[in-house]
Image (cartoon, helix red, strand yellow):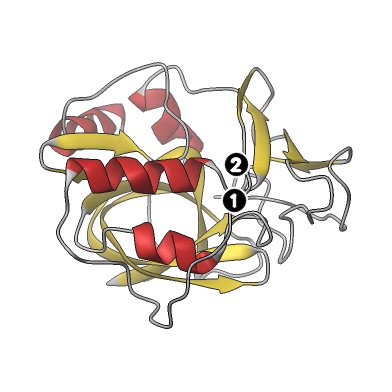
Amino acid sequence: MHRHRTLLVTAALAMATTACGGGSPAGEPGDAGGTGASTSASATTPTVEEATSSTTGATSTSASSTSAEGAGDGCTAAGLAAFADVMADLGIAYDYAPSASVADLTGRADIVVTGGLRAVDADGDQLLFTVEVDDLVAGTLPEPASTLSAAVDFVPSARGVDEVRDAMPSDADGVLFLVGDDEDPTRWFPLLEGMWLACDGTVTSLRAAPTWEVDSLDELVDAVRAAG
């Protein structure tokens, strides 16, 4: 079920630790890490896509918060754009092969689900998002689930989990393209172009924009179903 591709991930901070902590599966940049050790910014760690395009990380400091839930203060286009900016800069630089179409992205995922990001916490150098699942659009789950855990690699010294949490619109609808973990069937990893949320009629790919476009989550879901 699980795919293993190769992606070079380079830590964006000279003194940061690369995000390969619990060993994300070799499936996508920043979500998948395979094995790896702590390195400086000049080192690389194999992950999941082949290099041709890049998204860069940036430094930031964390805000104070105690709740794992997102802001939930209304889903707006401006708030979604701000959250996308946070998610695009998690302290890691990616070289990866962008998908050619929705069908291509679907083919790289083990499952595609609709739902939303309802909470986020950190486990070492992985952000763990609680995904509320509305529908399984493509693929097969080992067993039915109303929630999933989606892990995204990050550099804690570059982007604090509290900052991610405070920016996250917890009432946004979304579509997630996920690959599974061979060792932990409860944990899933979003593809780099595979985290889509919508607010106020605006649909956004959170971490990297593909070369193709969709105007709505419904259009995205219809294309996923057609690819199946």
Residue position for label 1: 31
Q: Position of residue 193 (x, y in %)?
A: 45, 35
- Name the outermost residue toward the bottom: 66
Position of 66 relative to 217 (above/below): below
Instruction: Indicate the secondary structure of the residue bearing disc 1.
Output: loop
Give whichever of 74, 21 is nearer the camera. 74
- Residue 172 percent coordinates (x, y): 21, 55
- Numbered circles on residues, count: 2
Is residue 121 rendered to the left or right of residue 103? right
Picture residue at 84% right of the left edge, 54% below the top: 36
Which amino acid lies under the numbered mark 2 shown in the image of this protein? Glu
**Mark 2: few, some, or many residues within 10 Å (few <14, many ≥20)?**
many
Q: Which of the numbered marks, if any, corresponds to residue 28?
A: 2
Give the residue at x 18% y 38%: 217
- Label 2's element? loop
* Mark 2 vs mark 1, CA separation in Å: 6 Å
State the residue at coordinates (17%, 26%). Answer: 215
The one of 9 and 175 positioned closer to us in this rendering: 9
Look at the image and tell me whether residue 197 can be seen.
Answer: no
What amino acid is at disc 1?
A: Asp
Q: Quadrant of the C terminus?
A: top left
In depth, the one of 227 and 149 nearer the eye is 149
Instruction: State yes or no: discs 2 and 1 in contact (Cβ < 8 Å).
Output: yes
What residue lies at 88% left-to-right and 37% top-to-bottom? 42
